[in-house]
Amino acid sequence: PRPVQVALIRHLPGEAGPAFTGTLRARREADVAFRAAGRIAERLVDLGAEVAEGQPLFRLDARDLRLALAAAEADLLSAEASAANAANEAARSRALLAAGHVAPAFHEARETAARAAAQRLAAARAQRDLARNRLDYAELRAPSAGRVTAVLAEAGQVVGEGQAVLRLADPAERELLVQLPEGVAATPEAQIRFWARPDAVLPARLREVAASADGALRTYAARYSLPDAPDWARLGMTATLTLAAPRAEPLARVPLTALHDRGEGPMLWRVTGEGRVAAEPVRVLALGEATATLATSLPEGTPVVALGAQLLEPGTRVRPVQTRLAGSLR
């Protein structure tokens, strides 16, 4: 085998693309609301507070809800009495019908009245359970652990059922929300630099892009997740998102002595696993004093002949005697 000097292919980092400003948001953020209407009697948490699942957040004035529960319980007692009386009358009518003392039509009327009373009893029980649930809804509890990012109501305010009173965010998963113009495509990978920490550069990955543009801004909302967000990255912080410049194929920088042309265009000698060389065509983008920048489809770490390329033929057996450091290709 012919002794050769070998260099390893190292892809060049992508150039910086366009940059946009965004804010750090929680991936899961929800507006929390009462499931019953009433006047707020007490607010139990402050803005920015950390809450646990099931922790009380607000309380309503429950006097009207207690009255509604008392009325529902009274209706239930009345319905139970009516249902019991109708059932007894139907039983007596059944006995009289068997003895031949009443007409079938009279008995059918009693049976119908008993069934209607039983249905009214079921409806009264449902109304009692609903009133009991509404009384329980007078205390608003946190549906999950998180941080309070907005307080939308105060004590003394009358709120309707389903009206948001507080915004709760889960800070465990954080992402950057940016608005991209129509002519910019969101890249899968990007870098984030926070204004408060300009020296720290964090990697980000695209999670979702809005399917339609905003009606007023004509921009598309894109969310980039931060898989390893540091503790100092707090919700609401401002950051700059830098997209990766689009590139059709990877770039590499090799020594000029690795280039060879056999009349079919520039090429490199790739060292195969069997210790032989194979020709790999490349596209030269730039030439320097000692190196060349190429567009190549060779994978990262592929060994190529760095010296003596003009002395080889396809299939020549070679023996690497020296491997260039990765830094020599950059």
Image (cartoon, grey):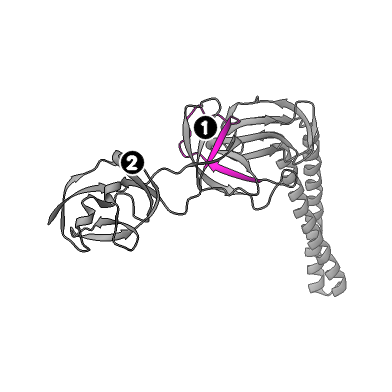
Q: Which mark is residue 167?
A: none
Frontmost of labels 1 and 2 is 2
Quadrant assignment for the C terminus: top left
Secondary structure of the residue carrying tag 1 is: strand
Q: Name the side, left or right, on which 132 lies relative to 170.
A: right
Q: Name the side, left or right, on which 87 lies relative to 179.
A: right
- The foreground one among 42 and 19 is 19
- The foreground one among 161 and 31 is 31
Residue at 81% x, 58% y is 117
Q: Which mark is residue 289?
A: 2
Residue at 57% x, 36% y is 170
Residue at 58% x, 49% y is 185
Instruction: Note whether 171 is above or below 266 in the view shown.
Output: above
Q: Residues within 10 Å of mark 2 (few under 14, many from 20)?
A: few
Q: Residues within 10 Å of mark 1 (few under 14, many from 20)?
A: some
- The foreground one among 138 and 116 is 138
Task: Measuring from the top left, give residue 269's x and y in whole percent.
Answer: 26, 56
Secondary structure of the residue carrying tag 2 is: loop
Task: Measuring from the top left, give residue 14's x and y in whole percent.
Answer: 45, 44
| Residue on which the image places disc 1 | 193
Residue at 16% x, 59% y is 317
Instruction: Note whether 149 is above or below 227 in the view shown.
Output: above
Quarter location, residue 223: top right
Q: Amino acid at mark 2?
A: Glu
Q: Which residues are magenta?
A: 220-243
As for residue 26 lying within the magenta part, the answer is: no
Task: Measuring from the top left, give residue 50's x and y in whole percent.
Answer: 57, 28
